Amino acid sequence: MSEAHFVEELIDQGDDFDRWYVEVIRKAELADDAPVRGCKVIRPYGFGLWEQMVARLDARIKATGVENAYFPLFIPKSMLEREAEHVEGFAPEVTWVTRGGDHELEEPWAVRPTSEAIICPIYARWVQSYRDLPILINQWCNVVRWEERPRAFLRTLEFLWQEGHTCHATPEEADARARQMLEVYRHFLEDDLAIPVVAGIKSEAEKFAGALRTYTVEAMMGGKYWALQAGTSHNLGDHFGRVFGIRFLDRDGERKFAFSTSWGLSHRTVGATVMVHGDDAGLKLPPKVAPIQVIVVPIWRNAEDLGGVEGMVNRIVERLSAVARVRVDWRDDRTVGYKFNEWELKGVPLRLEVGPRDVAADQAILVRRDTRAKHIVALDHLAATVETLLATIQDDLFAAAQRSLAGHTAEVATRDELTARVAANAGWSLSYWCGDPACEGRVKAETKATIRCIPLEQSAELGTCIICDHTSHQRVVFARAY
Amino acid sequence: MSEAHFVEELIDQGDDFDRWYVEVIRKAELADDAPVRGCKVIRPYGFGLWEQMVARLDARIKATGVENAYFPLFIPKSMLEREAEHVEGFAPEVTWVTRGGDHELEEPWAVRPTSEAIICPIYARWVQSYRDLPILINQWCNVVRWEERPRAFLRTLEFLWQEGHTCHATPEEADARARQMLEVYRHFLEDDLAIPVVAGIKSEAEKFAGALRTYTVEAMMGGKYWALQAGTSHNLGDHFGRVFGIRFLDRDGERKFAFSTSWGLSHRTVGATVMVHGDDAGLKLPPKVAPIQVIVVPIWRNAEDLGGVEGMVNRIVERLSAVARVRVDWRDDRTVGYKFNEWELKGVPLRLEVGPRDVAADQAILVRRDTRAKHIVALDHLAATVETLLATIQDDLFAAAQRSLAGHTAEVATRDELTARVAANAGWSLSYWCGDPACEGRVKAETKATIRCIPLEQSAELGTCIICDHTSHQRVVFARAY
């Protein structure tokens, strides 16, 4: 046991949160640079985290009656251009395939930045009668949007996500589906990732290109208390139905255009999990999605110790495997201290130490990553204690994030106060807004803060717009965003 | 119950097997055409089948110590061109991105046709010491190869697959890993998809561009008894290690190049499953991967019947859900006969009928898709019977496919016989081959049959090459291939 004694140190969050993020992503081996501009490699530990998220969100999506399918990566240019607002919104970000095999393509193909424009023409073929509705389909895939300044998980040229696309006979049903999927996202974020969110509606300026209305769940990151849009769900009205000719013969014998929705959540949620729960020592992963929930660190000084420890560790792994994702760190070129630091950096919720004394006493030591509290546990109670602790850690992480969200959100009535809060990275501001894009634009120009959403939950009180003093019936969340 | 009484008829396999394939893919709703040249849409039923396959193969791959990760979709041109044989093999099939956002790229990017050329430069950064080896990583992703004549699942411009990429300190370890993954594929195909395979080595002419040696599992399709390459595993030697500079400091203090492997299996296996097990009535899905294992068809004539049937169906679903993937077909705009035909076409292994008489007798009728055998089963024994029948169907499908493989494989000693067999679509020919590419080329030119593989299992007997009469120590499989 020599070579490396200490894990390379991480910068403190308070010194430079953005640099802390970049460092922790790299040092915890979540992602790495790639030799293609704008792209990152997702390493096994980061991908393992995403896999856990995918499994949970996929089950939640399927539970609402949605099925998975797969649509092409490429969208012919003319098809992408059919919905005017949509193409205007996405054109500056599109990468284009112009050559295939040995020849130039007759028409360039966009690498999908999102798939409405390729899916709608297909739905137009599938939908003939009201009996064909609703269509409820989701796909897990990669999408590409041009990006000059990549940031692992948050903003990369290529990213992984799911995108759901549904078609309905009535506008009410489409809106209900868009809201239902927003609730799915909310439960996933809050219950699985321990990230509290504010659910709301995007302003016209911030909504999805081509949508009638965009619903969003916004999460507050740590450090600078900026917002991250964690998932969006769009009521597309009949815009895409009309443009792509998705028509059906209704019960009443009339031919009508279908109403549609789309909704997406990407691997930004990995970045969100890092920024919401992490601390100066590194990641703190919520147990439900941690790829490793319990890291076993055996401690031995000599071959004599090793025999007993090995037997004990094997028994422990056997007992714990049914209740948790367990891994044992048997490396012999790292000190125990190094291992402790590294698994803390990697945010494994529970560390389990087994040394010769523990073998003698038929016990093990459990250490929580979040509180660092130690628990000496008899082998017979180990599985039950691990289960309880994992559930407790999950709850405690959520409660801490809720406190942070509440503690860094304030009702703000004046423009000066808003400006000062944004400048000081003090958190989110809840302010009245009249609904005029000019007032919204003014805040953005002056402070760089945007309207993250108009929360779905509103009090009945009226107020005055923080910019123009007109009467307003709605508070909105102003914040800087990633 | 009216509108549609009969499922649209399928052409017989014997009349035109290729057309049967195209029709069954469309009518069983596995895939559909897409409005982008060369691409197909994978519909929910087809994707559900692929999802079951992915889950099983993923578990098998992980059980060997491999972890999943994700590498970029794009490969800069200069990077793809570094391994000369590799780029020569793939260049004619590559699609190129030349524009991003509003500007031309300085250097075109290939949309990955396979990922060695983007992964190796990254591994070169990760590997410094023998302690960093082996690297055992897999990714599930989409790849793109130019395709003029697409065929759903078998040959499409974009397709879904997994590609594993490993690095090792010694050539022996790399070869052992390549063989190990071939065995994983073999077990997946035989045990999960009920498709028997012949495992072997590709000839130099047929091996992966850039590999030292390519291992393959070849499966025999129905109808024309052509071969389908179902999965390949490549021992890449140190070719890629040298070209991309993957070097490590070994235990002995010397800096050495790493040895690598790659191995891939794609959604062609969906096509293989269709072609191996299907019959004139449609698909026959192996229970282990069937998205729906039991389709419940309730039978009722009036509202009075319906009440009792509904209660019974609910009880049945509750009991069966723990042992099988069950769906109920409650459609009221389709006749019972239509439903029977449709679920046969879709290859659901077991049909469960519940009518008023069954309610009265507390029983249900189970019908096997493969044999059409009927079983009247008391409710109390239903779950156990379903489990047993699903396992039996799985075994029987495998046994039938084994019989077909054996029955359409013959030892062939003369060129005339080989030519006649290939022309008559009589099946595979096992013939001696001297190893000379000229002889191999001659068979291909004359018959269009290729050497599918040099089987790993060989008898000790010597023979004479089917072309040149030189002594040969190996039999090879000659066959037409998809």
Image (cartoon, coloured by chain):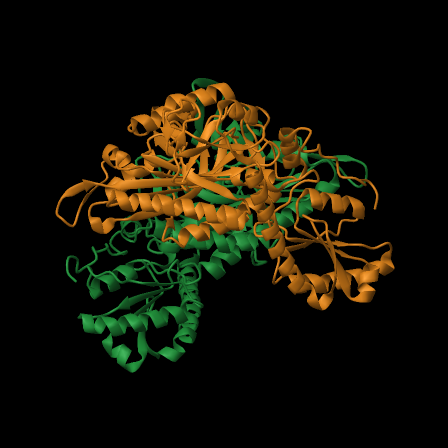
Chain colours: A orange, B green
Q: Residue at x 59, y 52 (%)?
A: A394
Q: In this view, does A194 lie to the left or right of B325?
A: right
Residue B12 on image: x %, y % = 25, 56
Outermost residue on the left side: it is A253
Residue B245, image x, y percentages: 67, 30
Task: List x then y, in percent, for residue B205.
Answer: 50, 39
Write down the quadrant of residue A86 in the picture. top left
Residue at horizontal 24 percent and vertical 62 percent from the top: B339
Q: Is residue A155 above or below residue A457?
A: above
Q: Which residue lies furthest to the bottom in this view?
A: B361
> Residue B444 sits in which quadrant?
top left
Count of numbered tags = 0
Residue B37 found in image quarter: top left
Measured from the top left, where is residue B209 in percent x and y?
Answer: 53, 36
* In the foreground, A399 or A338: A399
Q: Which residue is drawn at 20% across and 73% down?
A: B304
Toward the viewer: B286 or A419?
Answer: A419
Residue name at image x 46 percent, y 22 percent = A443
Please identify the quadrant where the N terminus of chain B is shown.
bottom left
Determine if residue B300 is in view: yes
Q: Which of A122 and A459 is in front in this view?
A: A459
Q: Is residue A26 left or right of residue A453?
A: right
User: In the rendered view, would you say A125 is above or below B316?
Assistant: above
**Residue A364 higher or lower than A19, as above or below:** below
**Is residue B267 in view from this perspective?**
no
